[in-house]
Amino acid sequence: DTGVSQNPRHKITKRGQNVTFRCDPISEHNRLYWYRQTLGQGPEFLTYFQNEAQLEKSRLLSDRFSAERPKGSFSTLEIQRTEQGDSAMYLCASSPLLNTEAFFGQGTRLTVV
Amino acid sequence: GIQVEQSPPDLILQEGANSTLRCNFSDSVNNLQWFHQNPWGQLINLFYIPSGTKQNGRLSATTVATERYSLLYISSSQTTDSGVYFCAVEGMNTGFQKLVFGTGTRLLVSP
């Protein structure tokens, strides 16, 4: 296992389009997180899954955002009707159940034009 | 919610110099991690250190949980150490597992 994998690495989309990102966590990790990072800031929490259950969502996650983790394996983050303010780096992380050390993927950089 | 402050915000070093980065947090924590963000944006794990002291090569870290701070030491810095260093904590009273990040320390090591 080579770590957390995210696809695509870069995405440029026109305002109003929908986009979907994928995250494959480290295989034995039960917990999966999505974060968003804008320029010059630290990552901000978006949502958290334990296995397939989505246990927490940040207020940052508007109705246009949805995340899934079917069967407790990979996860997808979808943004509908993208806006310029959605331009950011979207980071996925996973951690094991017994401790909470998080490992991050390479991120997906979204640019909305 | 828990607050995380990092200092200094920016640091410029000559290659070979030593440095100390500080992270203060406002509440008790279950987890504290230090990360290095490389120029491509990936967060590299440096230390998982909710308390105590750890060392890994030229890097070491100390967390004094009772006084709510952590320090990251970089010795004999190299140009490859350049980047942004983040401290992130999981508050004990958050109710679920999430990391709260500081705004980072931007380190530039010049040859």
Image (cartoon, coloured by chain):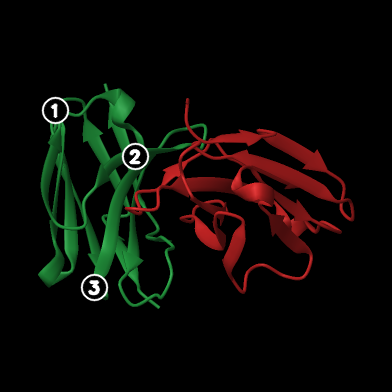
Residue at image x 30%, y 24%? B79
Disc 3 element: loop
User: Counting residues from the N terminus, which is met first, the one under dot 2 or under dot 3?
Assistant: 3
Between label 1 and label 3, give the one nearer the viewer.
3
Label 3 neighbour load within 10 Å: few <14, some 14-19, many 20+: some
Disc 2 element: strand
Residue at image x 14%, y 27%? B76
Q: Position of residue B52 (x, y in %)?
A: 10, 53
> Which residue is identified by label 2?
B45
**Is A8 drawn above or below residue A92 in the view shown?**
above
Label 1 neighbour load within 10 Å: few <14, some 14-19, many 20+: few
Q: Amino acid at mark 2?
A: Asn
> Which residue is identified by label 1?
B76
**Is B10 drawn above or below residue A57 in the view shown?**
above
Dividing the picture into quadrants, the one containing residue B85 is: top left
Q: Amino acid at mark 3?
A: Ser
CB of mark 1 within 8 Å of CB of mark 3? no
> Which residue is identified by label 3?
B28
**Chain B, which colour?**
green
Between label 1 and label 2, give the one nearer the viewer.
2
| Drawn side of residue B55 relative to residue A20, left or right | left
User: Counting residues from the N terminus, which is met first, the one under dot 1 or under dot 2?
Assistant: 2
Question: Which numbered tag is attached to residue A24?
Answer: none
Dividing the picture into quadrants, the one containing residue A13 is: top right
Identify the subunit bearing mark 1. B
| Drawn side of residue A29 relative to residue A5, left or right | left
Q: Position of residue A68 (x, y in %)?
A: 70, 55
Q: Position of residue B34 (x, y in %)?
A: 29, 47
Q: Are marks 2 and 3 on the same chain?
A: yes
